[in-house]
Image: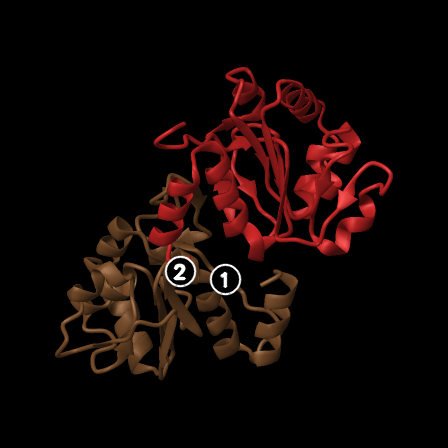
Chain colours: A red, B brown
Amino acid sequence: MFSQIEVTVAGLNGAGAVKCSRDVVVVPDAALEDAAGKGPYDAIVLPGGLKGAESFGQSATVKTLLTDQQKAGRVIGAICAAPAVSLPPHGIGEGKKVTCYPALKDRLDAGKYTYQDQKVVEDGELITSQGPGTAFDFGLALVKKLVDSEKSASVAKAMLL
Amino acid sequence: MFSQIEVTVAGLNGAGAVKCSRDVVVVPDAALEDAAGKGPYDAIVLPGGLKGAESFGQSATVKTLLTDQQKAGRVIGAICAAPAVSLPPHGIGEGKKVTCYPALKDRLDAGKYTYQDQKVVEDGELITSQGPGTAFDFGLALVKKLVDSEKSASVAKAMLL
């Protein structure tokens, strides 16, 4: 249980500014290589955006992080393109129920994943979600998982959700 | 009518990185002083976050921009703290129906503004909204105003809203 959740935004290719899929430019808190050495983390969460999700799917650092996270039974979250594009190349979440951006669901090998058309799907320590419009539900599911239902409800209320 | 909306994110205190109210760090596309010289803009939109909204309310540049925008009959948008904290000091939107983050509604002089407890309030060219949980509604209302209902509906669908 935590009263607050401390978040580290990690940059895949260093600590420099990252232009996101809709041209917003975000500065990470740390380079992924540096952040990886400061784990373990209670949760590792992958954002969407197709190009970024593809880069996660090709990264050896991401593979190591997620594989260790999964072995340790810790939370992994992924939304939008990430469940379909970032997890399968690393063999993460196989055998589990997942969701993703619906147009990308065919990237999930049906023999390895069970796709569910829901805003958020939680199967054990894997939490997946569908896209921008389900991002609040996804975030609140993570708060509920990492803290509790009361915290999730109070955050939702303060955000006017 | 536009097929795309081009957005300039302007930094109040220059073009350097800005730490937002929840510690996300965003890099503006331009300094506000530079962006101001490239107008007029079809819409000027003020984000929330209490400290940032207070800074907007104290800025002579923001006052000039919003006053000119209002005189020209162009769109002004404000969400969360901004309608209650950024607009009144500059005399923007007086006489209009507005909404804001509900806990801040007493900052709106009832003799000058009519508060409405709705997710989005549109009165002429002034569009206001309540907070994080109403941000998608706010954005879609701006798309509808600047483009049309079809574009707003197609964006909502693609975002899974």
Percent across and percent down for residue A25 are: 51, 46
Percent across and percent down for residue A59 are: 71, 28
Q: Which residue is mark 2?
A: B35
User: SS class of the residue under badge 1?
Assistant: loop
Percent across and percent down for residue A142 are: 51, 39
Sequence-first tag of 2 and 1? 1
Q: Could you tell me how far apart the alpha carbons at marks 2 and 1 are, in whole angstroms?
A: 11 Å
Q: Residue at x 57, y 54 (%)?
A: A134
Tell me the quadrant of the picture where the C terminus of chain A can be found.
bottom left
Q: Label 2 amino acid? A: Ala
Question: Relative to B13, does residue B45 appear above or below in the rendering?
Answer: below
Q: Determine whether, in the image, residue A43 is placed left or right of residue A3.
A: right
Instruction: Give whichever of B49, A157 is nearer the camera.
Output: A157
Tag shown at residue B141: none
Q: Which residue is mark 1?
A: B7
Residue A66 visible in the displayed image: yes
Q: Residue at x 16, y 65 (%)?
A: B106
